[in-house]
Image (tube, rainbow, N blue to C red):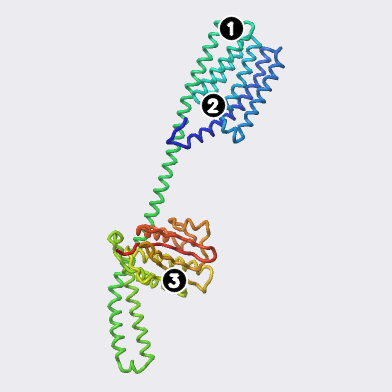
Amino acid sequence: MMHPDYPGYADELREFHIAFSRGGAYTCIILVLFGAGLDLALYPQMQMKFALARLLVSAMIFGVVLLLRKPWGQRLAPSLTFLWLLLPQIMIAWMIYVTEGVGSIYYAGLNLAIFASGIALGFGLWQNLMFGALSYLLYVLACLAHPRGLEPESVFAVNSLFLLFATAASAVYTLFNERARFMLFRLKSELAAKNAEQELINKNLAEIKGQMMQQEKMAAVGTLAAGLLHEVNNPVNFCLMAIEVAMEEPAAKASAMVSECLTDAKEGMKRVQHIVSDLKTFAYRKPGLVTERTVFLFEKALDTAVRLTGHEIKGIVITRDLPDDTLVRGDEAAIIGVLINLLSNAAMAMRKVRPTDLAIHIGAIWQEQRLITTVRDNGPGITPENLPRVFEPFFTTREVGQGLGLGLSISYRVIEQHGGVLVAESSVGEWTKMIFDLPRAD
């Protein structure tokens, strides 16, 4: 029975046929051999002849079982099952012929095999009907070959009816067994599909949970940035004004050291202004930025990310190779977040293996209206077994408490929302490269 909607059913049914054929064959061998007790009780004078017949048939059935262990034998399992079932039927027909013909008690063995083929074995409907028909034909031939022929006819008629009834009942059993097996397989398939769907839902929920946690962090940073802007900008401006006034004083101009110190203080105050402004840009993320085609300079976003990761990348040589035009379209704050994540990951990975000679190179080229960006470090690299998993939510090689494993997963989703893809390449012990692309501004 083939079901196009359930392609795996044919394979499972084949395995079922093979398993039940072997089990049925071993059971048949035991029944054939134990039948020697019936021979002893009814026909002691035929004991030796029947024992040899039983041993021969059992050996032949065992030979079929050995064939079922071979790959080509498993492909022919229904035919081989039909063969070993027919062997005891032939033996029983011979016993009927050499004993009492129509009245021989051995005809009951034919019924037993017919019922077994329908109830216990994985036969199809037409196979079962054919087996029943052949069993009945063997019975008729055994009776015709007996000296008394079909006499008594009443007994022959009754036995014939029982054999035909057994064939019909076995066929019905076969039909319903086949349907029950298919329903069981269908339920298993549907359950497996539901489990797979549930796993996907759980994975999506985990991703959503991670994004919600990230959004909560961004909201907290946004609140912090707003407070910083309010509390820090005024004193910074006062300091800048005071420095400007001091720099104009004759004493300051007369002293090179004082002038240099004031210049450094002025640059420091400006850096504070930049950091607070960068925090504001990074934290205040509004929905729909990508679809509204907001444009920004990628170079400016990179500058912001470098400043915000200044403590983490301290001592690391940062080089860049960018085109003159880096105007792209998208969510500037989200891209800053991606760059911060990539720079932080690279810095942490490199510091694990050596404290000096650390370098990160950021390169970008235009290709078919997309800015292809590469962030490459000279760290320890990523092992081949971990490389396909780096973008999975909650996957991390860091120690417990040092990260949730969500950064690259969220970064992947951000780039995906910009119509691009984030790809990881690595050479163990040499380098790791993260590549992503952004759309050119219209």
- Near mark 2 (Cα within 10 A), the count class, few <14, some 14-19 or many ≥20, is many
- Sequence-first disc among 1 and 2: 2
Task: Read off the residue under disc 1.
Answer: 150
Q: Secondary structure at mark 1?
A: loop
- Sequence-first disc among 1 and 3: 1
Toward which corner of the image does residue 25 lie, by quadrant?
top right
Task: Read off the residue under disc 3.
Answer: 312
Tell me whether the residue at label 1 lies in contact with that at label 2, contact meaning CB atoms closer than 8 angstroms.
no
User: Which of the two marks, 1 or 2, is nearer to us in this view?
Assistant: 1
Tell me residue 190's x, y (percent). Answer: 42, 38
**Is 343 left, or right, of 232 in this rendering?**
right
- Near mark 3 (Cα within 10 A), the count class, few <14, some 14-19 or many ≥20, is some
Tell me residue 132's x, y (percent). Answer: 54, 18
Q: Vertically, is 91 above or below 374?
A: above
Tell me residue 337's x, y (percent). Answer: 37, 65
The amino acid type of the residue labelled 3 equals: Glu
- In space, the residues marked 1 and 2 are separated at their CA atoms by 32 Å
Task: Read off the residue under disc 2.
Answer: 121
**Is 107 left, or right, of 188 in this rendering?**
right
